[in-house]
Image: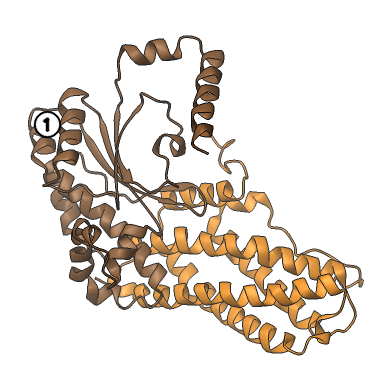
Amino acid sequence: MIGTLLNNNMNWASARVRADPGFFRRLSAQQAPEYLWIGCSDSRVPANEIVGLDPGELFVHRNIANLAPPRDINFLAVLQYSVEVLRVRHIIVCGHYGCGGVRAALDTERRGLIDHWLQPVSDLAHRHAGHLDKISDFDTRVNVACEHNVRAQVEYLGRNPFVTDAWRRGQKIAVHGWIYSIRDGLLRDLDLTIERPKDVDRLSAKAWFPDG
Amino acid sequence: MGSTGKFQPIEPIPADLLQEPLIWFFAEHYRHRDLCARLLSVMQSVVFDEPALREIYRFLDEDLPLHVIDEEDDLFPLLRRRCEPDDQIGKVLGMLSAEHANDMSEAAAVKQIVATALAEQRGLACYKNAVQVIEPFCFQQKRHIAVENAVVLPIARHRLTVEDLDNLARRLAARRGLSDPFADAS
């Protein structure tokens, strides 16, 4: 029932105040998160909760398949605001194994608008089809593509003008690529962290598959 | 069953071993072999051995799925990132992942028979499909483990960094609700 959500909210706010009477007063005064989270819309990947951060500590952008599309005005507005106004120190691209968006990008079923949204993932899979197709188990192929998708978004961000301009100004920003498993609730660092333009070139030069 | 004839559970892995995660995997494989030995033994008996069947069911229901996550969501992705083309690991991992998917469906069939035997309080030999479900599962398990022990774990020892292994160990522990194996180390 929808009313449950409003009741839950009342209980949550009341418990917060009991634990910390000044919590909402402080929170309403300003937001100064150090992190921008770019994650998937999947309801099983609640950003704040899985990294143990309170409201106010994580600036969040979520979309299907955790994309950082260079022509999405919503995403670009979030990125510019978080880099130039909030001056976040870390941008985290977090994918998750078994992502339904990545799965949809890899199969041949037509779904409509979502196919256009997922086009960058389909293109990526197409570029690596020679390797991906060798993985006979479809779930594993999806999981490998989920990791590759995170890497592709980290690379896009590393070449995004908002990020490169910030680096040029001497602003410290690190972009990280992580992946989450819904099966165990744990995050994995995919070792994709970039902190300067040179790191982006180094990352782009890295092989995508162990066999080249 | 132990040498004394008294029921003994499948030996748990000492928590200390988490500090050596690749040894942990070897130990876990040993437990899988133990499971197969028990299954192949009880499938021939018409006598209802409740503790033995419960232990087998518990292992298939709890330990096996965790082990598949240990490998599919942790060890194999790490190897895909760390291995060099000369290792030729991609094809092996692809094959093992397909087997994991198959393991889970075969394990579900074995679990179903064990659950029926428990509910009806009968030995597994009372069920005419027990052998045809259990034998291929055990055969596949043993072959799969042999490949992992002979190919995957030695390459992992060679390619994974100390940091990889420490993080792997922490996730193995967290996945089981155990405390950080290196918490007292600093």
Q: Nearer the viewer, residue B167 or A2?
A: A2
Q: Tell me if residue A209 can be seen.
A: no
Which chain is in brown here? A
Instruction: Judge whether residue B4 can be spotted in this image.
Output: yes
Q: Secondary structure at mark 1?
A: helix
Q: Residue at x 11, y 31 (%)?
A: A166
**At 76% across and 90% down in the image, what residue appears?**
B128
The chain to which mark 1 is attached is: A
- Image side of residue B49 versus residue A53, left or right: right
Judging from the image, the colouring scheme is by chain
Looking at the image, residue B121 lies above or below residue A155: below
* Vertical relation: A161 (above or below) B46: above
Q: Amino acid at mark 1?
A: Ala
Looking at the image, residue B6 sits to the left or right of residue B183; the answer is: right
Q: Is residue B118 above or below residue B143?
A: above
Instruction: Give the residue at x 34% y 14%.
Output: A28
- Residue B133: percent from the left, percent from the top? 67, 84
Residue A112, quarter of picture: bottom left
The chain that appears orange in the image is B
Q: Position of residue A91 (x, y in %)?
A: 26, 37
Q: Is residue B95 above or below residue B56?
A: below
Residue carrying label 1 = A166
Viewport quadrant of the C terminus of chain A: bottom left
Instruction: Please name whichever residue, A99 or A180, is drawn nearer the observer in this view of the structure.
Output: A99
Q: Residue at x 49, y 68 (%)?
A: B153
* Left or right: A91 in relation to A81: right
Q: Position of residue B27 (x, y in %)?
A: 63, 64
Image coords of residue B186 (percent x, y): 53, 33
